[in-house]
Image (cartoon, rainbow, N blue to C red):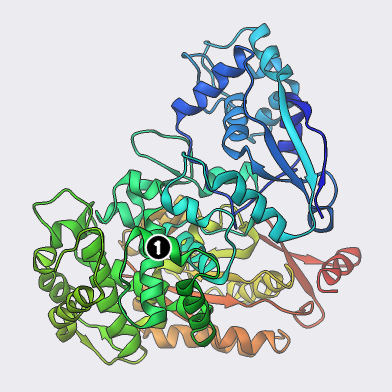
Amino acid sequence: MVEIMTPRGMSVQEAYRLYRDGNFLVNRKYQRKLVWTEIEKIALIDTILRGFPIPLILLAERPHIHGHGRYEILDGVQRLNAIFSFIENSFPMDGKYFDIQEFARAKQLAEQGIFRMEDSANKLDESQCANILDYQLAVTIFQAFDDEQITEIFGRINSSGRQLSNQERRQAGVVNPFGELVRKISTELRGDASKDILLLSEMPEISIESSRARQSYGLTADDIFWVRQGILWNSQLRAGHDEEILADTLVSILLNEPFARSKEKLDELYTIDSELNRKVETALISYPPDKVYDEIKQVFSIIKETIETIDSGPNALRNIVAPRSTNPIKASFYSIFMAFFNLLVQENKSPIDSKGIIEALKNHQSEMISSGHYTKSEDRERNIDKTVGLIQRYFAYKEPPALKHGPGLALDFENSLRRSRIETPRYEFKQGLLSLVDNPILNSELLNRIVNTICAIANLGPNSEGFIYLGVADVESDAERIKTIYGTEYLSISDHYVVGIDREVQKMKMTIERYLEKIVNHIRNSELPEPLKTQVLTQIDTVTYKNYTIVRIKVPTQSQMSFVGDEAYTREGNQTIKIEGKKIVAVNSLFA
């Protein structure tokens, strides 16, 4: 049942208060990322300053989920972000910034370091700032208790919108296993994976900007695999063509034959109860979503590592497969991905010669059968078979296989670095086991802290798995200290510094296996409870990332509170803290 409330005016000042109090929510199951350019944002601010009306803001209140007074934004995410980011000095209009001194709440937050205040002397005058704060937004709020109601309303709002691309229209208002799986995989591959419900203030961290039009977003299109490798143009990524490629790939895997891709077929794929949609949903019963999700991610990760081991520059794959072209290489990439999938998943082999694979793929696109609007399954089958023939000699059986180890986990590792900026308590990073002194020695206290952190992450709640990584420094001074001690370089990734544990392995004169054994034995002999201890021990692995070895300790979700002996721990930000008394009661209530 949907209870409609009469549209009302809401001042920008009131809306900003709701925003910074954490009451505007974005549900990523149906909402887009932030996509407006600065030009579009400026146009909206100009409209407000002129006193002209802007489209209605539609909010859903779901008290049974979020409590009263918190709202999922169904329509208006881009507009609200534009208004609030202007107030917080993210961009000027006609060279002038909003004057924070004219808004006490924003001034207080800027002084607390929540956002950076612009020092420019060019500011809007007092009356202009007041006009923005007093401007009345047209807002409709309704109560809803059903996910289907929300997605149907969102779909009706957006399905015919000319501003949406074909793929965005397909996904609008569709929450079924296939569409959800495409969405989930695509966020992992772009690097904007997050929890499903985000605060509006967190959206910039998972949104994508162009290198030519900086928006202070967390991701840059040119750094995302699809664009960096020349598979898609920047504009195509923004329009959701990466999700089209994944839908195409996913249905090919589920139905065990290359998809006869066309716009019409993709539309049918997303049409609920169409013959093709029913066929795919049935296939997902026998081929579980979690399994295909992991397989696609891991194959993608291995392709990425294979390319970047040889060439980490822009357009590396396009320069290999189509050296004289500046056009996207979507068709060629499909054949390459499916060939890797066949070798890695179906034959359980691992790449043993990255250079050989890259050499074999030179001018690949010119050897592929090209298609027009309609792509034939038979032609795609021949392309895949030819690609397998080109690269299969550079694959072999290995233990452990690359698919679930080493390079197969590189993508998850990269995403953990990004996600830790929003979901900080779930992630812990350690530079290694040795102390940072001129003659490094084993830091046994660090091993105890790892055990306590495992307990703390497990106590975040019944739906909060987490990760501890060794081989990553979280401050640059530590990375520089490691460089001085060991003479090794480091990688700067998303506010973290990848240093690897290879230098420590060499210093300790042991193998990576013996290094892991030290960690495993310490956890095994700890006072962590069962089944947490066993679950952690079976999920310790190494990640191969750009020739650095990282240790990953996965902490799975638990159904009850955990202790280390008689002591309990939890996470506050990136800190592990011991808890007692009322805090223990509060943590225990999370599992009730």
Q: Quadrant of residue 508?
A: bottom left
565 vs 376, left or right, is right
Inspect the image, locate mark 1, and give the three-letter code of the amino acid beneath it: Leu
- Where residue 509 appears, as percent x and y from the top left, is 35, 83
251 vs 384, left or right, is right
Q: How many marks?
A: 1
Q: Residue at x 69, y 26 (%)?
A: 106
- Packing grade of label 1 (10 A; few <14, some 14-19, many >=20) is many
Q: Quadrant of residue 21?
A: top right
In-front residue for pair 218/320: 320
What residue does disc 1 label? Answer: 266
Q: Residue at x 45, y 78 (%)?
A: 292
- Where residue 323 appears, as percent x and y from the top left, is 10, 56
In-front residue for pair 128/283: 283
In-front residue for pair 440/575: 575
Name the element at disc 1.
helix
Q: Quadrant of the N terminus?
A: bottom right
Q: Quadrant of residue 448?
A: bottom right
- Where residue 579 appears, as percent x and y from the top left, is 81, 66
111 vs 90, left or right, is right
- Where residue 494 appears, as percent x and y from the top left, is 45, 52
Q: Quadrant of the C terminus?
A: bottom right
Q: Is residue 11 among the parts visible in the rendering?
A: yes
Q: Residue at x 61, y 57 (%)?
A: 424
Q: Is residue 495 among the parts visible in the rendering?
A: no
* Above or below, 171 relative to 19: below
Q: Residue at x 46, y 68 (%)?
A: 412
215 vs 384, left or right, is right
